[in-house]
Structure formats: structure tokens, C-alpha cells
Image (cartoon, grey):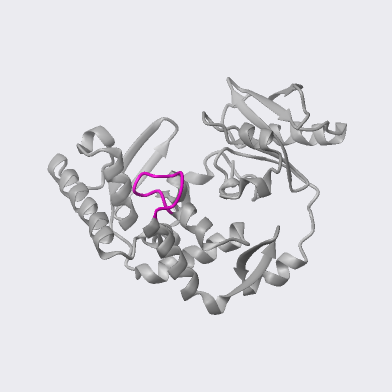
Amino acid sequence: MALHARVKDVSPSAWKDPQFVQIWGPRGAVYVVPRADVAVFTLGRLPRNPVLGAEVRAAAERASRAFRSRQNSLERALSERATGLNFRELRIASITGAVRIEWDGAAISWRIVEPPTEEPEAARLELARRFLRSVGPSTPKEFAWWTGGWSGSFVSATRGELSDAQQTFRSLEMELIEVELEGQKRWVLRADRSRLERAVPVDTVRLLPAGDPYLASQDRALLVPQPRFRSELWPKSVWPGALMVNCELVGTWRRQVGRVTVRAWRPLESEVKDAVEHEVSRMPIESATKEVRWSTGDMSP
């Protein structure tokens, strides 16, 4: 769904193309990335602290031994239970790029692969560039929050994660420029400044899935100013998807038993509703029913 929101003619099986692989990435999510980018999204999160880095590599070694003791061939994927390791250990080990997650609906398995050979420092800097290009303007604190969580804490960045993020921004100093957004100092890539200054809203309707990269910002108030609607989009339970109209988040959506329920936070014009229903009909989901149900609760902030 995230690809469908950005790329034309995405099929339900597009993510299974051999040029893509799955990795356990930032914010504790499974990412589909080009094979050439594996190092960026794995080694790019490797802690600079030698003690923490050693912990990550030790977890990868334990995973490798566990796989070798349970099968003759490392080409076969194993479930978490079959590896004999817990999810936290596998998640930490995956930062080396040598342990790869494979997720397909409710089924999760793991595989040992050849690790990327790129230098971690180069991967760290490129990951920051990708982050700023995707959600910038931003700050080292937000970057630390986004890349962190490998130790199990997703609420806020640890001191070490913040220190790493600050070091990364310092290393990119010549590529960054300071800007002001909502009264706060933030940074963007110099190469992106003119593009951002000339940006104009696009007349379009998109259904962003729960956990979409666009929603992966620590500053949620910037995306959704009203507290009530923020709590609806990011509840403590299962997150819904987001309804975007002309680059503005205006509601939520959920799919259950083939039906898509859309809840708008403001009255929508009939042509917008038609566009939403058309977008639902184009969902790249196999055997999906295309019925839309509109939720019409209290829309006041």
C-alpha cells in the first residue's frame, strides 16, 4: 500500500520482486528495500559505541550458530521458535545485515545471509540523507527517535542514540542547511532546499497504510494539529491508515473482512468521496472486496 500511494501500477505481488528484500528497519517496522540499499537500512543503524556495537555483532554470531545447529543448509528460512532465539535477539542481530526477516501476513521467518560489505559510517550518513529527503526538515532528536528502538525502547531515543544522531548531523554539516519551521530550528539537505521552497500542494487522494513512512515523524502535531484526531490516528491499540486529501491528513481508514471503513474529520465534497472510493477500488490487495463504508461520527475537533 505504501508503494501504491507513490508509484503507478503497483501489483499485489510487487514487493516479492527479486530486486527487493525485507529488513527489520527503523521504528521496529519491516521494510521492503532494494537489495543495493540493505547496508543503508541495517548497518546505518549500527551504534558507534564499541560496547553496543559488540553486542549487536555478538547477537549475529549467536544467530548464525543457532541456524547452523538446526539445519544443514543456511538457505532455508526458520521461524523464531525454530531458531531457539527470542525476537529481541534476532532484531538486534539483523542490524548487521546478516540476519534477515521474511514476513508474509501472519507468518514471520528469519534467514542467515551474507552481510553487506559497506562501511557502517558511510551507511549512517546515507541513512540520514534518506531520512531528511523523506520527512525533512527535521532534527537530530527526531532522527535518533526514528532510527532507534533497536534495544527495545520505541517511546524515546536513548542517550546513545541521540549522541549518534548528533554526530551524524555534524558529519553532514556541509550538506545541511538550517531552516525554521513552526518557530523551531530544523535542518534539510542543501540540495533539497529550493525544491521544498517551491513545493505546492498536489490535488490528489491517497490512502496511506498504518505505519507509512510519511507518518513516521516524532512531531505528530505538525501532521495533525488537533489532539483528538492525533489520538485517533495514533491510538494505543492497532493503528488505522490515514486518509490524505490534497496533501492534508483529513481522516482514517481501516479494512476488515473486505470492507474499507473511512472516517473523515471534516465534511468531504462528493467528488472527493468519489476519488476515495476509486482509490479503494485500486488497492493492490489480492481477492480484496472493494466495498466502502463511511463513518459519520462527530467531526468536531
The image shows residue 105 at horizontal and vertical percentages of: 45, 32
Q: Is residue 169 above or below residue 285?
A: below
**To which quarter of the image does residue 270 belong?**
top right
Whether residue 8 is visible to the viewer of this picture, yes or no, is no
Which is nearer the eye, 187 or 238? 187
Residue 191 appears left or right of 31: right
Q: Which residues are magenta?
A: 148-158
Which quarter of the image is occupied by the C terminus? Answer: top right
Q: Quadrant of residue 276?
A: top right
Q: Residue at x 71, y 28 (%)?
A: 263
Spot occupied by residue 97 in the image (x, y as percentages of width and height): 33, 56
* Residue most extreme to the right: 270
210 vs 249, left or right, is left
- Left or right for 183, reference 216: right
Q: Main secondary structure of the magenta part?
A: loop
Q: 114 or 165, which is in the foreground?
A: 165
Residue furthest to the left in view is 69
